[in-house]
Image (tube, rainbow, N blue to C red):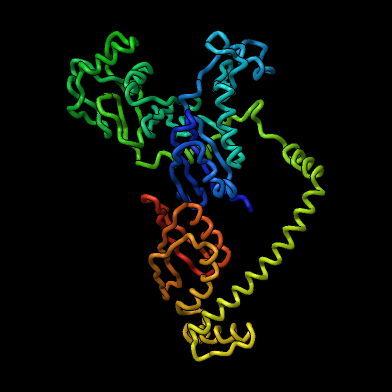
């Protein structure tokens, strides 16, 4: 199946196998979300195989499992920087450097910005994706996929965590309970002066009576970062947030236009050049990827040939039985719809009579009317029996047919959309899941 370069499947992996996994399909061409959802744990990744088969897959690793830091580069080590980096970090890390994957995010003069993660975590994530049949194009920290602001931080809450992006290569995942202490450690502006008692900066920059200075002083004491509060000025950090800001954290919060957090991350993952699939995790060349399966196929060629011949014979017999069943069913439907025609000498006779009746009912042989649409759609609907249609609306003036449908899984809508796109211009609306049912709308127009 041809890969869609304008659509991406973005998967936010979890720290533990039993934690939820968020996912979203984003179309940059249509600038909209095609589908989204949440898996209960990593073992259900194979449910996204149909989406992954047609799109590039981008994986987001939890920032809480990745150390984003920087290190000074010694003179003369630039050419062998990738090999030297783990040893430069050895004194700062409590683990054996052989157990860590160190990836260079960016070099800024004599400073290297790096991401550090345990090999066992990288291997666990990639193994889970590989077992689900997915080939990952990128793997990067989720916090670094948030929008980047030149002045200030970017923040959004996902589940019980806050993702915060500080710069191009710095970000963090913070639990809501210690977000305030972490922000103090970054010297974010805390309004706790005598002139600003019981005041907070709201999303528009105005003062609002909501902050308890004792609470702010308590946060300062807990972090041991600052000994006394300071008065914020124009250079103070502003936190741009896309989800409702937390209570009782008196920083300078600025609300941005609300968006789905996974939509923000998907857009950022598509645009960024960052990719932690380096070193032992770098994608293999195409010829190396395909030569190993072919070697195994060559060894088992004889057995495969016998199996294929056997399967072909059984398939032919099955198709003959199925064809006979179709003929019987078509004759039954013909007699039910046109009871005045009892004798059916040939299948071509049946088809001519049905076409004639459809032309009569559908507007004298032209393509106007509802019946020609239904006749063309019937074989497509049969190929996806899992989809149930709850409403059908035909607009002859606009030349379009609108369908409201429900299904048990997102992939059923995806199968229907692919089949319809071969014969119609398809516009699929937002899919939503309520309980065990997925609801959605599809608008069809004839191709010009």
Residue 192 lies left or right of residue 166; in this view the side is left
Q: Residue furthest bottom?
A: 340
Residue 205 to residue 56: above or below: above
Q: Measured from the top left, where is residue 31 in percent x and y?
A: 47, 50
* Number of numbered markers: 0
Residue 252 lies in quadrant: top left
Asked if residue 144 can be seen in this view, the reply is no
Q: Measured from the top left, where is residue 127 in percent x and y?
A: 59, 33
Residue 139 lies left or right of residue 370; in this view the side is right
Residue 187 lies in quadrant: top left
Residue at horizontal 23 percent and vertical 31 percent from the top: 206
Q: Measured from the top left, where is residue 359 in percent x and y?
A: 52, 85
Residue 241 to residue 70: above or below: below
| The C terminus, quarter of image | bottom right
Q: Nearer the viewer, residue 222 or 346?
A: 346
Asked if residue 48 can be seen in this view, the reply is yes
Q: Measured from the top left, where is residue 108 in percent x and y?
A: 56, 21
Residue at horizontal 47 percent and vertical 41 percent from the top: 23
Residue at horizontal 53 percent and vertical 73 percent from the top: 376
Residue 414 to residue 356: above or below: above
Residue at horizontal 36 percent and vertical 31 percent from the top: 160
């Amino acid at each position: 199946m041809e890969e869609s370069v304008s659509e991406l499947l973005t998967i936010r992996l979890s720290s533990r196998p039993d934690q939820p996994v968020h996912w979203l399909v984003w179309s940059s061409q249509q600038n909209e979300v095609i589908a989204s959802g949440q898996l209960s744990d990593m073992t259900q990744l194979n449910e996204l195989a149909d989406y992954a088969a047609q799109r590039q897959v981008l994986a987001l690793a939890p920032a809480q499992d990745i150390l984003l830091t920087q290190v000074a580069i010694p003179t003369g080590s630039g050419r062998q920087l990738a090999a030297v980096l783990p040893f430069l970090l050895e004194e700062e890390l409590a683990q054996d450097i052989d157990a860590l994957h160190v990836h260079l995010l960016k070099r800024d003069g004599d400073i290297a910005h790096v991401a550090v993660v345990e090999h066992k975590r990288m291997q666990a994530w990639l193994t889970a994706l590989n077992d689900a049949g997915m080939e990952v194009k990128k793997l990067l920290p989720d916090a670094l996929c948030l929008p980047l602001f030149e002045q200030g931080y970017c923040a959004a809450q996902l589940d019980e965590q806050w993702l915060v992006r500080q710069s191009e290569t710095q970000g963090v995942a913070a639990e809501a309970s210690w977000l305030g202490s972490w922000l103090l450690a970054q010297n974010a502006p805390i309004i706790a002066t005598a002139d600003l008692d019981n005041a907070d900066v709201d999303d528009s920059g105005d003062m609002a009576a909501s902050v308890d200075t004792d609470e702010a002083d308590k946060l300062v004491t807990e972090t041991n970062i600052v000994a006394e509060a300071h008065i914020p000025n124009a250079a103070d950090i502003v936190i741009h947030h896309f989800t409702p800001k937390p209570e009782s954290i008196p920083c300078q919060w600025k609300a941005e236009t609300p968006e789905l957090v996974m939509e923000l991350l998907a857009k950022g993952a598509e645009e960024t050049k960052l990719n932690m699939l380096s070193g032992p995790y770098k994608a293999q060349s195409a010829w190396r990827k395909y030569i190993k399966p072919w070697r195994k196929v060559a060894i088992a060629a004889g057995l495969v040939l016998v199996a294929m011949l056997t399967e072909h014979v059984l398939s032919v017999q099955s198709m003959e039985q199925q064809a006979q069943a179709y003929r019987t069913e078509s004759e039954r439907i013909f007699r039910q719809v046109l009871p005045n025609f009892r004798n059916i000498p040939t299948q071509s006779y049946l088809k001519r009579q049905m076409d004639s009746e459809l032309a009569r009912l559908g507007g004298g042989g032209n393509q106007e009317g509802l019946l020609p649409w239904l006749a063309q759609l019937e074989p497509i609907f049969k190929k996806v029996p899992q989809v149930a249609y709850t409403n059908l609306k035909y607009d002859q003036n606009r030349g379009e047919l609108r369908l409201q449908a429900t299904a048990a899984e997102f992939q059923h809508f995806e199968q229907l959309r692919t089949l319809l796109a071969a014969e119609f211009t398809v516009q699929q609306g937002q899919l939503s899941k309520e309980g065990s049912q997925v609801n959605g709308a599809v608008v069809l127009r004839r191709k010009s």
